[in-house]
Image (spheres, coloured by chain):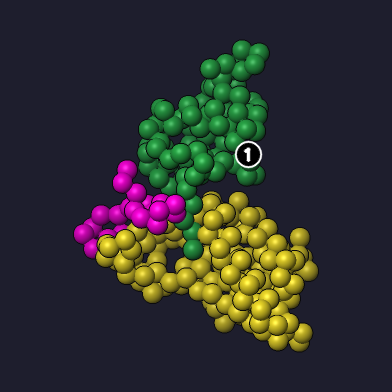
Chain colours: A green, B yellow
């Protein structure tokens, strides 16, 4: 998958709780053609075998909760949160 | 946000929650009601014997989103003060995992505001629970089903 202008960007992905265990790492640097957080989630779900539907998960970009259709920029830190279970 | 005005207080802590100290922060001469909720670690879930659990949080967003929930509650329910604390780390059966307290002029606002805060904290904060079972295995809890995950 390529960005609109066909270029790749570098981002950092961070995984929490069950995602960290499934990915086998807490953080990784990625070069991706994904243009949105949702596209990047599909990419990493495929690669790491994450099973949770996107509707049950949350994403934060640069320490702020974000919508899944938020465009990604070079250098973004993207935090993937599996279904929460506080309380 | 209202934190500066001393009306709200939210914390994520790896220490035992000091309920008495938190309750004192809610005192106000205008308050006619105080309502609180505690979530305790129970010894069973979904038919399994639970012996302990771990809470994991992503602190920066858990705190900012927690403060947002408290600010919403202050405004919607006309509360005087609101405070909450959520544990992270290892907890044993009977430990308090989460505490919410509110003060208001009247009981209706206090009950409603307290209920709002605990419901929103549970669904919005990046906090995850891993249960340890009597058989020695463990599992992350899926909030959608309330059951241990099968993956």
Q: Going 53% across and 29% down the picture, which residue do you hit?
A: A40
Image quadrant of residue A58? top right
* Of B50 and A8, the residue lying toward us: B50
Give the letter of the chain under mark 1. A
* Percent coordinates x, y for residue B92 in the rendering: 36, 69
Residue B14 counted in the magenta span = no
B118 in relation to A51, above or below: below
Instruction: Name the quarter where the N terminus of chain B is drawn.
Output: bottom right
Secondary structure, mark 1, is loop
In the rendered image, the residue lying farthest to the top is: A6
Can residue B128 be seen? no
Type of secondary structure dominating the magenta stretch: loop
Residue B124 is situated, as x and y percent measured from the top left of the image, at 57, 54
Residue shown at the point (61%, 24%) measured from the top left: A35
The x and y percentages for residue B126 are 53, 52
Query: Which quadrant would residue B32 be assigned to in this image?
Result: bottom right
Magenta segment includes B141: yes
The vertical placement of A62 against A2, above or below, is below
Residue A83 shown left or right of residue A34 in the figure: left
Percent position of residue B10, x then y: 63, 65
Across the whole image, how many numbered discs are drawn on residues? 1
Left or right of B129? Residue A62 is right
Up/down of A49 relative to B63, above or below: above
Question: For residue B9, which quarter of the picture?
Answer: bottom right
Q: Is residue B35 above or below residue B150?
A: below
Identify the residue at image location x=53%, y=59%.
Answer: B122
Residue B145 visible in image: yes
Q: Quadrant of the C terminus of chain B?
A: top left
Residue at the spot of label 1: A67
In this picture, residue B64 sits left or right of residue A27: right
The residue at 34%/49% (across/down) is B149
Q: Magenta residues?
A: B132-151
């Amino acid at each position: 998958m390529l960005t609109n202008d066909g270029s790749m960007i570098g981002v950092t992905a961070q995984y929490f709780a069950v995602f960290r265990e499934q990915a086998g790492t807490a953080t990784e640097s990625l070069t991706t053609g994904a243009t949105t957080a949702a596209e990047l989630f599909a990419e990493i779900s495929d690669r790491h075998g994450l099973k949770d539907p996107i509707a049950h998960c949350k994403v934060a970009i640069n320490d702020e909760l974000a919508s899944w259709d938020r465009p990604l920029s070079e250098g973004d830190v993207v935090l993937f949160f599996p279904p929460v279970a506080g309380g | 946000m209202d934190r500066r005005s001393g009306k709200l207080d939210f914390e994520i802590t790896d220490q035992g929650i000091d309920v008495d100290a938190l309750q004192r922060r809610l005192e106000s001469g205008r308050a006619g009601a105080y309502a609180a909720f505690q979530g305790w670690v129970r010894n069973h879930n979904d038919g399994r014997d639970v012996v302990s659990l771990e809470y994991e949080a992503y602190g920066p967003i858990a705190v900012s989103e927690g403060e947002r929930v408290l600010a919403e509650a202050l405004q919607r329910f006309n509360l005087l003060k609101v405070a909450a604390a959520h544990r992270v780390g290892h907890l044993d059966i009977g430990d308090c995992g989460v505490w919410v307290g509110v003060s208001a002029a009247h009981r209706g606002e206090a009950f409603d505001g307290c209920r709002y805060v605990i419901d929103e904290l549970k669904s919005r904060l990046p906090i995850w629970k891993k249960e340890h079972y009597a058989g020695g295995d463990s599992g992350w809890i899926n909030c959608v089903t309330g059951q241990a995950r099968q993956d």
